Amino acid sequence: MDNLQKLSRRLINENQVVCVETLKVKNMIRNPRLAKHIADASWGELVRQLEYKTEWAGRQLVKIAPFFPSSKRCSDCGYTLESLPLEIRSRECPECKIRQDRDINAARNVKAAGLAVLALGENVSHG
Ligand SMILES: [Zn+2]
């Protein structure tokens, strides 16, 4: 809990805009292979803290829907894989051949999607 407070405070202090993927935490916890991972990460609580802290600090929080293919899409060329099993932690893009860490690639996609949403002028920070 203390770590989550520190993390959310740091993210808000260091960034004007924070983009998060709103994972379907409840569904994922029903999957026993994912449950421990997701519960440990306390994703829902982190998003909740980011929501009120962005408001206090006058920052912007952009939430990206869970169906967005953040892991399957190459953040470099946009090529999207049919599927990407969770145990695969890094992959080479079949199109542009770049090698990417799964989570860093997903983070780059979520950021790009979040900035695109802001550029369109849609305020999704409270939805
Ligand atoms: Zn690529």
Image (spheres, rainbow, N blue to C red):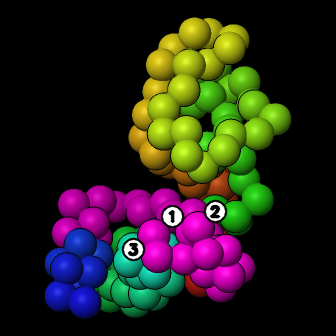
Identify the residue shown where x is 56% and y is 19%: 92
Q: Position of residue 86 (x, y in %)?
A: 60, 49
The mark nearer the N terminus, 1 or 3, is 1
**Is any part of residue 95 visible from this angle?**
yes
Q: Which residues are magenta?
A: 9-37
The answer to whether the beta carbon of the residue marked 3 is less than 8 Å from any atom of ligand 1 is no
Residue named by callout 2: 64
Q: Nearer the viewer, residue 50 or 15?
A: 50
Give how far apart the Cα atoms at labels 3 and 2 are.
18 Å
- Please give left or right for residue 110 compared with residue 17 in the image: right
Three-letter amino acid code of the residue under disc 3? Ala
Q: Label for residue 20? A: 1
Q: Label 2 sits on what residue type?
A: Ile
Badge 3 is on which residue? 41
Q: Which residue is painted at 42% across and 40% down in the image?
A: 104
Quarter of the image with the C terminus in it? bottom right
Q: How far is the residue under mark 1 from the one under mark 3?
A: 14 Å
Q: Secondary structure at mark 3?
A: helix
Q: Secondary structure at mark 1?
A: strand
What percent of the width, then of the height, locates residue 106? 53, 44
The answer to whether residue 55 of the structure is visible from this angle is no
Q: Main secondary structure of the magenta part?
A: helix
Discs 2, 1 touching: Cβ within 8 Å: yes
Give amino acid for label 1. Answer: Val
Q: How far is disc 2 from disc 1 in space, using C-alphas?
A: 6 Å
Q: Residues within 10 Å of mark 1 (few under 14, many from 20)?
A: many
